Image (spheres, rainbow, N blue to C red):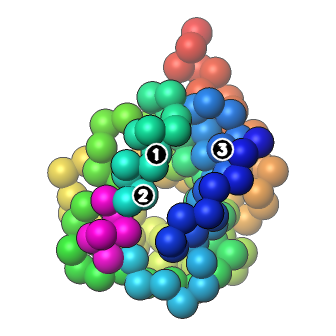
């Protein structure tokens, strides 16, 4: 496990093809942050990779960031850990936002379940 602190989040490399993202509290994710995020993932993970988005904190997105977020083909699956109903509903709304690449996303209320699901998804790619 490797911990990396970026300007907007902590990213934990759980294995060479899975990372956990914990966005800092009260951040507005803008296009510059999305670019930093995408560059980091592409330089630290082996594609196709999966992401565990741990929604511990409250944060928002600019319109431009919403259009660019998670829009590259190297992402296999996304597991989101939502600790309450509002966070789960917000995540569903974000996932439904029109973009060039649809998110292959599942929402969990438990981090271990989310991680285990991602492990299974990555294993299925290799078989």
- Assign a secondary structure to mark 3: strand
The answer to whether residue 96 of the structure is visible from this angle is no
Q: Residue 37 bears which disc, if any?
A: 2
Q: Considering only vertical position in the picture, is 124 above or below 62? A: above
Q: Which residue in the protein does label 1 denote? A: 41
Q: Main secondary structure of the magenta part?
A: helix
Q: Quadrant of residue 63?
A: bottom left
Spatial CA distance of label 1 from label 2 is 6 Å
- CA neighbours of label 1 inside 10 A, class few (<14), some (14 to 19), many (20+): many
Instruction: Say if the magenta span includes residue 125.
Output: no
Q: Residue furthest bottom?
A: 26
- Assign a secondary structure to mark 2: helix
The residue at the point 58 percent across, 32 percent down is: 17
Instruction: Say if the magenta span includes residue 33.
Output: yes
Toward the viewer: 2 or 76?
2
Q: Considering only vertical position in the picture, is 72 above or below 20? A: above
Spatial CA distance of label 3 from label 1 is 10 Å
Q: Residue 13 bears which disc, if any?
A: 3
Looking at the figure, which quarter contains the C terminus? top right
Image coordinates for residue 4, horizontal then vertical, percent:
63, 55
Compared across the picture, whether 114 is left or right of 92 comes to: right
Toward the viewer: 66 or 108?
66
Range shown magenta: 30-35
Q: Are marks 1 and 2 in contact (CB under 8 Å)?
A: yes
The residue at the point 48 percent across, 78 percent down is: 90
The residue at the point 42 percent across, 57 percent down is: 37
């Amino acid at each position: 496990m490797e911990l990396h602190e970026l300007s907007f989040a902590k990213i934990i490399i759980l294995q060479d093809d899975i990372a956990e993202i914990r966005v800092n509290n009260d951040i507005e994710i803008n296009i510059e942050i999305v670019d930093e995020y995408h560059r980091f993932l592409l330089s630290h993970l082996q594609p196709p990779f999966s992401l565990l988005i741990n929604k511990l904190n409250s944060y928002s997105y600019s319109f431009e960031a919403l259009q660019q977020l998670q829009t590259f083909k190297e992402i296999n699956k996304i597991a989101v850990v939502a600790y309450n109903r509002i966070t789960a509903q917000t995540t569903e709304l974000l996932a439904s936002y029109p973009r060039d690449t649809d998110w292959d996303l599942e929402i969990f209320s438990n981090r271990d379940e989310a991680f285990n699901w991602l492990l299974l998804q990555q294993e299925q790619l290799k078989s």
